[in-house]
Image (cartoon, rainbow, N blue to C red):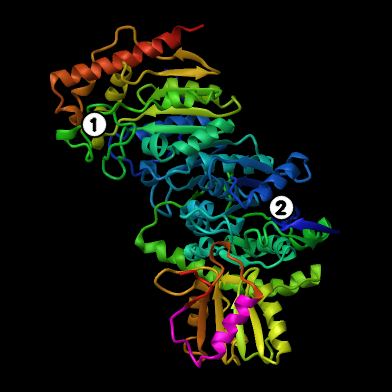
Amino acid sequence: MKKVMMGNHAISYGATLARVQVIAAYPITPQTQVVELLSEIVADQRLKAEFIKVESEHSAMAACIGASSAGARAFTATSSQGLALMHELLHWSAGARLPIVMANINRAMAPPWNIWTDQNDSLSQRDTGWMQFYCQSNQEVLDTVIMAYKVAEKVLMPVMIVLDAFSLSHTYEIVDLPDQAVVDKYLPPFDYQYKLDVKNPHTYGGLTTPEWYMEFRIKMHEAMDQALVEIKKEADVFEKAFGRRYDTVDPYMMEDAETVLVTSGTAASTARFTVDQLRAQGKKVGNLRMRVLRPFPFADVRAQLKNAKKVIVIDRNISFGYHGIWAQEVKSALYGHSQVPVFNFIAGLGGRDIFPETISDIVALVDKKKKPDQELYWVEVKR
Amino acid sequence: MKPTLPLEELMSPGHLACQGCGAGIAMRTTLKALGRDTIFTFPACCWTVIDGPFPYSCLEVPLLHMAFEATAATASGIKAAMDALGKSKTTICGWAGDGGTFDIGLQALSGAAERNDDIFYFCYDNEAYMNTGIQRSGATPYGAWTTTTPVKHFKKEVKKSIDDIVAAHKVPYQATASVAYPEDLYKKLIKAKEIRGFKFIHIIAPCPPGWKARPEDTVKLARLAVQTGVFPVYEVENGKYAQTLKTANRKPVLEYLKLQGRFKHLKETDVAQVQQLVDRRYAELEKRFQEK
């Protein structure tokens, strides 16, 4: 069934179709519609779930950890400051190997207060052990919620689904709502092997000495390696079930591209519009949309950028005193494998629009340079 | 002689509690009342260590260790999952120390109490951050020495009234208890287990290293805390207060204070101040006990 819906509602429908059993959430702009719709769906008993209206995001994640540990499929959604407040428990949920799924609406960190899109909130959580999937359409958001549980429950690591504030969360698009029966077949009920069980009592998360701590950590890392395999596998399985394909990266006009624009989130659709315009002028430009931040798809990134002459990474985020964060990731993947120059542009922070002209100006600037003469370039900044 | 408590032990020997640990007695008694169909979550607290290091555990019920400030919300999450999975009969318990309850965990505690989630929240109260080395908490009483309230600047603030804070949430059941009176605690838990909604149990649990007391005095101190009125033992059921351990002739607080090195710097005037604080609190509670 096709339905016009905002990105936030695509999350709610995704969670409903995934038959989540416990939802714990706290309101934050621009996430609120996610939980508002879920509240209605649960109240109407269209979804058999417990909804805990907690008093903070920290408690939202704590409740998800409790629920997931007891064997329920747990879900929450947040944004920005809320995600930052959860930070401690993001480490905890990953360390506890819980397949929790959360949607995070990318919103700038304060101060100054700003509710618009910016990736510093989610990218700051890079090293917590959460998988991160960045979406560019409402259809992808809904599909990714369903796919996320599949991957998370296979490898026992949590997943964060990430989408841009307003430019996706509040933008209405046509979304194909899959049949519940098809989703049920794709995502069967989950029986957590390590659940809190009074008939088979165990202690989880207890004090662990240096003798054993590293063994827990390598298992998490191996689970993330396995997650990459599962994500690649699910690209095929999901496509077979639903007719839509999502991989770790999403290439556009990349076959003969000499200049590659690397983007994430909704900036990709603007980049693609610009690529079309530049192609019409005879310029061999392509776009590589990064979908998965963790586990990082090294092989796919290297393969996609193998023939590029110049790589431009547009970051809607900044690691102060360093580069944009996607640029760091891409450079690190290419190091020792490629000599291609990587140009890093910081654009669109705090929800500033990234226009087609923004991107064509970037390409024009790069055209004039053989290699970067600055560590990074800030674009369209008032001085 | 007929035993006053079940003989079955769900807490094994070999745990890592200090000699004379009140928190150990509190857990042992609690498990006798709640039985095997019970799940616990602990924040950072003494019990993080007492239970035993990986891969050991001294408890014969499932236990989820959790972050410091998250006890109540975690228990709410476990409860929601058990409801969703059709296992509503299992008793879900948060079990935290005083720091994790009075201070860092207060927000989550308030949230769960306000939602009236069907869980037990236990606070075993040893009146300071004992696991980290005796730092003052909101539960540390007036006059006490801790490593962050040295003798020259002993604690001048009164103990936070956590029971009144919880009572302000109008929870269906709350009680105080002392490890010196296990039958009283047991009876309360057997009753509370059948009550649906939020249940708060506050247990005074002496800490020999933190209180600078002799391990063999733990039960004596827990008894004196009640007999002097320092820690009145009562329950509140749907707003109705009832004193469960009567203390007709209260002993002077000095009898309680003098067994503890943490109070040994107190001058006569300071002791008088403690006595006054205790008298005032006791009078306040007595009024509530008499309310019909």
Query: Which image quarter holds the C terminus of chain A?
Result: bottom left
- The residue to which callout 2 is attached is A12
Q: Secondary structure at mark 1?
A: loop
Q: Residues within 10 Å of mark 1 (few under 14, many from 20)?
A: many
Q: Amino acid at mark 1?
A: Lys
B244 or A254, which lies in front?
A: A254
* Left or right of A84 on screen, residue A304: right
Percent x, y of residue B115: 58, 33
Q: In the image, what residue occupies the spot 53% across and 17% down?
A: B239
- Residue A280 part of the magenta segment: no
- Point out the stretch of residues depicted in magenta: A357-376
Kindly identify which chain the residue marked by label 1 belongs to: B
Q: Quadrant of the N terminus of chain A?
A: bottom right
Residue at point 44%, 36% (across, down): B106
Q: Disc number at residue A90? A: none
Left or right: residue B213 versus residue A175 is left
The residue carrying mark 1 is B155
- Is residue A147 toward the left or the right of residue A123 in the image? right
Residue B81 in sight in this render: yes
Q: Chain of mark 2?
A: A
| Above or below, comparing residue B245 to residue B171 in the picture | above
Disc count in the image? 2
